[in-house]
Image: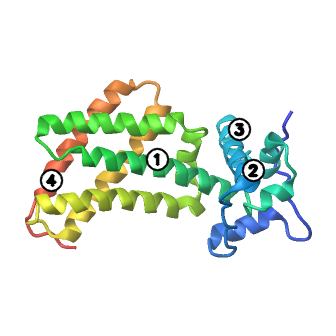
Amino acid sequence: MIDVSNTESAGPISRRAKSAEKRDNPEARPRPPRPTAGRALETYEKLVTAAGELLAEVGFERLTSNAVCARVQVTPPAFYRYFNDKYEVLEELAERLLKKQNDAFAVWLFRGGAWGEPAHRVAALEAWFRTAADIVAKEPGGIWTIRALRALPNLAHIRLKSQRQFTDQMCELARRLWPQVPPDLLWYRLRIGAEFGYVIDELALEEDRLPSDVLFREAAYLISGLMDGLVRTEETKI
């Protein structure tokens, strides 16, 4: 049986204290470089996979480096060769999950996204929400990764970077369609819409009183309505 209790300590300064330092100052300790080949890469991938599996089983509060090592059958020094603490494994899981969503979103935009006629827009948005939620559901520990992105301050920069990338992708196309809207204002509006979309992932996996088909359809109608306001050009103080 794997011990998932918090037993991370090393020498006079505990790893827990070091983790707290990094949460307060993400630049306190640089993250070790990712391996690129050979057994090092194989071990790295096993550690990340095990962390995702354990995250789904016990949640991020009970996830420890010792539990990850036990799952992979390696010693703690092998873990700390690649990660300073468990939060860096969460960072890796979050980056991978959000990259999959960003890549899928780029494909969705390329195929037309939600920029067509209103009737097509709703169907396109509904398809995107379903795709995004499926990516989270299929990823080991996906819903816990989404929760961690919201709950842990030291992961906020990853979520913000991803959401800004979503917004930049939309804005690049939207500026061509609506050049009359000030670029900054257009970005602000799209950024707000992107944040609304992020919540759909959590609802799809947590709210069992709301059928997924209904959620995706109604969310698509709501976001489609918000998009009608993108072209509003009356004077707005920024």
Query: With respect to residue 127, does 16 lie above or below?
Result: below
At label 4, which amino acid type do we have?
Answer: Gly
Q: In the rendering, which numbered label is found on residue 58?
A: 3
> Of 38 and 223, which appears nearest the observer?
38
The residue positioned farthest toward the front in the image shown: 38
Q: Nearer the viewer, mark 1 or mark 3?
A: 1
Which residue does the image show at 20% across and 63% down from the upper left? 186
| Left or right position of 77 against 51 | right
| Real-space Cα separation, disc 2 to disc 4, in angstroms | 50 Å
* Disc sitting over residue 229 in the figure: 4
Q: In what element is the residue under mark 2? A: helix
Percent x, y of residue 183: 19, 69
User: Can you identify the residue that label 1 sits on?
Assistant: 100
Query: Which of these two is toward me, 34 or 155?
Result: 34
Residue 32 position, x and y percent, is: 70, 67
Quarter of the N terminus within the rendering = top right
Query: Which residue in the structure is indicated by mark 2?
Result: 43
